[in-house]
Amino acid sequence: MNWLATLNESQLKAVIHPGGPLFVVAGAGTGKTKTLTSRIAYLIMNGVPSHRILAVTFTNKAAREMKQRVVEMTGPHAMDVWLYTFHAFGLQILRRHIAELPYGYRPNFNVIDEDDGKKIIQEVIKSLELDVKMFSLKNLKNLFSLYKTRRLEEFERTDEEKIFKRYQAYLRENQLVDFDDLLLYPLQLMEDYPTIRDHYQTTFEHVLVDEFQDTDIIQYKLLKILGIRHKNVFVVGDPDQSIYGFRGANYENARLFMKDFGAEQILLEQNYRSTNQILKAANQLINYNFNRPAAKTLESDLGLGEAPFIHHAQTDIRESFFVTNEIRRLNQLGTRFDEIAVLYRNNALSRLFEEAMIKEGIPYVIYGGISFYERREIKDALAYIRVVIDPFQDFFLKRIINVPKRSIGQVSIQKLESKAKELGVAMFDAIPYADITPAAKQSLMSFRQLIEDMQTKFDEMENLAEIMPYLMGKTGYMDMLRAENDEIADDRIDNLKELQNVFTRGDEYYEGTFMEKLTQQLDQIALYSDQDQELDDHDRVRLSTYHQVKGLEFKVVFMVVMEENIFPSDRSLMNPSELEEERRIAYVGITRAKQKLYMSYADQRMVYGTMRYSYPSRFIQESRLRFDEPKIEGISEGGGHLLKTGDKVEHNAFGLGVVIRIDDDVATIAFGMPHGIKKILESHPALRKKKN
């Protein structure tokens, strides 16, 4: 166990803990994952059978990497460790025991995502003869989640309750579960079925939890049931980084754990990421939070480092160009673009920075866009596969019955659905009996034959790699995209090619028959979420909200729009607990930075079409940072103008010109005839300075 020698004193104390409940309070950059994986390896090396260890985390990527690391440390027998995300663990339990519940589920149920859930809610509203326009599908889905996870006691409106009950009935009738069910049903099995509860309480001698500060009340209840017998519960987390209250994360779980288990605490305070001036700002900021279950002070051996910079801009536009000019300067001095992050409180704040980067030619990416598995073409392909496996899944069948177009209109689909309900069968079985036009009937029968042909082919397949080429050719889906002949279609084709890579790798990852491997692959895909997106390898600046980059680190971090009523938000100023969460978000932002940290704000900002005056965020003062300005090449110290009198410029429409006056953000420019004198915003995307 040579790897024990790589641990610091606090990490080692946690790893070799003799047993019993332990809360490892791991600050940002203190090696929490290393500590957790070392603990699992230590247990195995000291005789604990791998299959008696349960470790849960929050992303599939983290679970994969942790298991790989434990295997490297202890050998292949570590593959038997139950190392999953909470939802993947719930899925494992349900595959084994869901038939015990009184809802009529079979073990081969399917998991739906957020988008699928909203589509089902829309169908339910129509079936109840309610006006879809009167409801927000997103809000209803969120409301249902609150109710199911016991954060909402009752519905305010009777129609919402009706829709919810029908939604749940639809899921059960169609052998579907949503992500909330992946936690609620396992909890129900543990609470209501003593034999199942006893089995898992006995099986799991050790329970370990990563990112404990992000757990919600349902996850904590599940953890408590599983760990209460042996009490060997090892949780790692940082309450100061608890920033997911809007998703249901319960900040009080840390106190509940200490109270329910009487847990010991070990603090990890040795930071391996940031220099001490950055950590000093983070420590001073978070000390303003009174409600801290475990206070700690981060320290580093990486030296004092540079003091964080504060930039005070006159306007929001000037702030955005300060950031882009400084990024350009840093890049010219050797900092890669992908080592730089620009962080903001909400996505709506990205626009000015995007425009400035486009104008300055700085490559960037919005981190946390549309998830791969939520893209239309990916969902279509997966729906085809699910229908081939089980054609009685009406929800997935309706998605692809007319994709590519087969002259099957919405009226025909509705009549088919009505006939299926009348006969008490699935839509697939009702196709021969549908009361529709002969032409539509022929199209439906051709579709039915297509699915049956594909079922025959699937029975002959041995490798998952065979699926996508066959599927895309047989259905005509790839021909449909090629016929569109545009950039969007090209992107969709590239996405489908990437899905091919997923299935090809599935042949390496999974064991068993073709269908067993396919089921495992589909289960894994169902568990993917936006949080699992990985940064690409391109050299681009990362623009992101704070929530999207939690757990990541960058050489340089810009915290922009640090203004009162924006960060912290105006709503949080009236609620002490919300204000403390806002402060924790700022703490997360500061602790992403390794070497350089910038905070910026503007005196004036355009909000809802009106220019308003702003004030610097209290978080700047609470971090006790001085308002020192770095000198930026190309920006005058007198005010940060992008242009100055006498500059030569070029405009897309007006051609060459000379700046004759600067007033605030407006440049007065003399262009050649017939354009003459024009007043133009310095930052206008059509205007650029001519190089000498």
Image: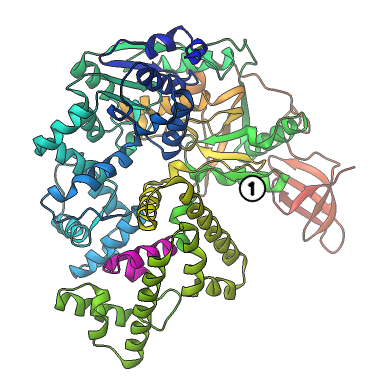
Q: Is residue 630 left or right of residue 86?
A: right
Residue in the picture at 69% in, 50% down: 684
Of residues 197 and 363, the one nearer the viewer is: 197
Residue flagged by tag 1: what amino acid is it? Glu
**Quarter of image, res 554:** top right
Q: Is residue 554 visible?
A: yes
- Name the quarter where the C terminus is drawn: top right
Residue 424 image offset from top left, x and y in percent: 15, 74
Question: Up-down: is 166 above or below 691?
Answer: below
Q: Which residues are magenta?
A: 379-399
Label 1: how many residues lie within 10 Å, few (<14), some (14-19) or many (20+)?
Answer: some
Task: State whether the magenta stretch is mostly helix, strand or loop.
Answer: helix
Residue in the picture at 22% in, 45% down: 96
Q: Is residue 74 left or right of residue 143?
A: right
Question: Up-down: is 66 above or below 278?
Answer: below
Task: Classify mark 1: helix, strand or loop.
Answer: helix
Whether residue 391 appears in magenta in the rendering, the answer is yes
Residue in the picture at 44% in, 54% down: 373
In the picture as drawn, the residue positioned furthest to the top comes out as 9
**Residue marked by disc 1:** 355
Question: Up-down: is 632 above or below 606?
Answer: above
